[in-house]
Amino acid sequence: MFLWSWEGGDKDYWKHLEGLEKRKTPLSDHLVALFEEWSKSFVGITAHFEHLLEQFEILASLVHIESSDITELDDMLGRQDPQSWVWMPVGRSGWHSSIRDRILSEILSDDLKAALLAAGFGNGSADFLDKSIANYRRIAGRMAW
């Protein structure tokens, strides 16, 4: 995931596949197309692989930003400029708002949020997790398809 986040990685490699030349998230789009059909036999009762993949991407983004400091998040989110944010990788859900909004609502629900915090998401801080999600929304707000 997030090939552009890793040294030597580049999302443009996946743009060489037919039909993915103009995609913002070519690897993720390719995986959704591939696994939507394949996953029916092994993912279980989840019928929507696209939702599952985007949920994974959002959680991975939230883990990635944990290397940032909360003061940096406070500084950027305190600015009125919607272009002020702390960089974090954003996958398909950056432009796929209908699924993104559903997933973020799920994450912010009391039960799931408590479970994620107990697992160490947001460095175990509800404030950090909330600000990470606000940062994610700000980045996603600049993506359009």
Image (cartoon, rainbow, N blue to C red):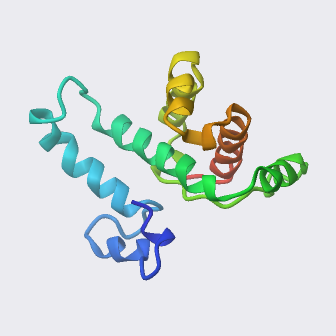
- Residue at the (42%, 68%) spot, across then down: 3
Q: Position of residue 114 (x, y in %)?
A: 56, 23
Q: Pinpoint residue 113: horizontal percent, then vertical percent.
A: 56, 26
Residue 35 position, x and y percent, is: 20, 46
Q: Is residue 30 left or right of residue 23?
A: left
Outermost residue, bottom direction?
8
Extreme residue toward the top, this view: 110
Q: Nearer the viewer, residue 56 or 32?
A: 56
Observer-nearest of 125 and 61: 125
Q: Is residue 9 left or right of residue 88?
A: left
- The residue at 13%/43% (across/down) is 38
Residue lying farthest to the left in this orientation: 41
Q: Can residue 118 be seen at all in this image of the molecule?
A: yes
Q: How many marks?
A: 0
Q: Residue at x 34, y 37 (%)?
A: 52
Whether residue 95 is visible here, answered yes or no, is no
Indicate whether 73 appears above or below 8: above
Query: Residue at coordinates 53% horizontally, 50% vertically from top-left?
Result: 63
**On screen, residue 45 above or below 96:** above
Say left or right for 37 vs 59.
left
The image quadrant where one finds the N terminus is bottom left
User: How far from the left and from the top, in percent, is residue 61?
Assistant: 53, 51
Q: Nearer the viewer, residue 115 or 20?
A: 115
Image quadrant in which you'd find residue 72: bottom right
